[in-house]
């Protein structure tokens, strides 16, 4: 059944699951799911790509994916946001959950169409001031879990700049570390 679904999905240019080995030459699918930790040899023909899901380590990010709307890097073995991500003007959803990313670059402010950002269970301790420029941001998920010596789960928040209160489209924010000045603004 799965094979039939994948065949129809590929034939209709809906989506492709890539397991490595073969090149991605002239792929016309709008959604690609990567299930390999190998470096892809070719990304030609992916200019119409809208969704890019990575289920393992990815060594390179395609350069021709400027129209991408969904980038799911959850649990990918990365410790920094790939430079090309901030050039994805149409990006609506960015998932970095479970990665080792330590900080978001100031250039994150270039993602003007970003609506959902998940940085939960990353190593990010504070958001840059530039996050306040993401006027379309609706969902901000950013907690992390630790265990103490008594084996209790501790939920840690992320420090946010005070200008986060200017994000009028923000509908949902998970755990944050709030300071007095931020609480007064809310």
Image: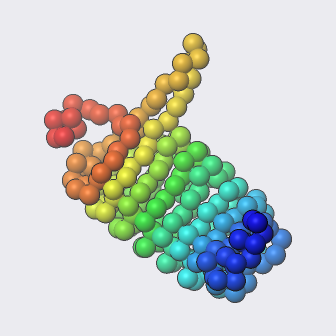
Number of numbered discs visible in the structure rendering: 0
Residue located farthest toward the left when viewing the structure as drawn: 184
- Residue name at image x 33 percent, y 56 percent: 138
- Residue name at image x 64 percent, y 71 percent: 32
Residue located farthest toward the top when viewing the structure as drawn: 150
- Residue name at image x 53 percent, y 52 percent: 96
In which quadrant will I find the C terminus?
A: top left
> Residue 58 in the image: x percent, y percent?
68, 61
Q: Is residue 93 left or right of residue 176?
A: right
Q: Is residue 161 left or right of residue 60?
A: left
Above-or-below relation of 95 to 4: above
> Residue 109 in the image: x percent, y percent?
36, 62
Above-or-below relation of 22 to 149: below
Looking at the image, which is closer to me, 100 or 145? 145
Above-or-below relation of 98 to 59: above
> Residue 142 in the image: x percent, y percent?
44, 43
Looking at the image, which is closer to me, 17 or 75? 17
Evaluate whether residue 59 shows in this view. no
Colour scheme shown:
rainbow
- Residue name at image x 41 percent, y 60 percent: 108
> Residue 60 in the image: x percent, y percent?
67, 67
Q: Is residue 28 left or right of residue 115?
A: right
In which quadrant will I find the N terminus?
A: bottom right
Evaluate whether residue 99 shows in this view. yes
Residue located farthest toward the front when viewing the structure as drawn: 1
Give the quarter of the image for residue 158. Answer: top left
């Amino acid at each position: 059944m799965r094979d039939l679904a994948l065949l129809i999905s590929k034939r209709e240019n809906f989506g492709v699951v890539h397991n490595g080995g073969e090149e991605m030459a002239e792929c016309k699918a709008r959604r690609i799911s990567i299930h390999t930790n190998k470096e892809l040899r070719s990304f030609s023909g992916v200019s119409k790509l809208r969704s890019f899901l990575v289920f393992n380590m990815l060594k390179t990010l395609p350069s021709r994916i400027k129209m991408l709307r969904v980038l799911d890097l959850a649990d990918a073995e990365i410790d920094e946001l790939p430079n090309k991500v901030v050039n994805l003007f149409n990006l609506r959803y960015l998932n970095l959950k479970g990665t080792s990313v330590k900080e978001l670059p100031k250039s994150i402010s270039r993602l003007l169409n970003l609506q959902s950002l998940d940085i939960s269970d990353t190593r990010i301790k504070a958001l840059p001031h530039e996050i306040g420029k993401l006027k379309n941001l609706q969902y901000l998920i950013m907690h992390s879990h630790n265990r103490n010596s008594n084996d209790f789960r501790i939920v840690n928040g992320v420090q946010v700049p005070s200008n986060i209160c200017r994000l009028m489209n923000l509908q949902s924010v998970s755990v944050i570390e709030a300071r007095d000045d931020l609480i007064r603004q809310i």
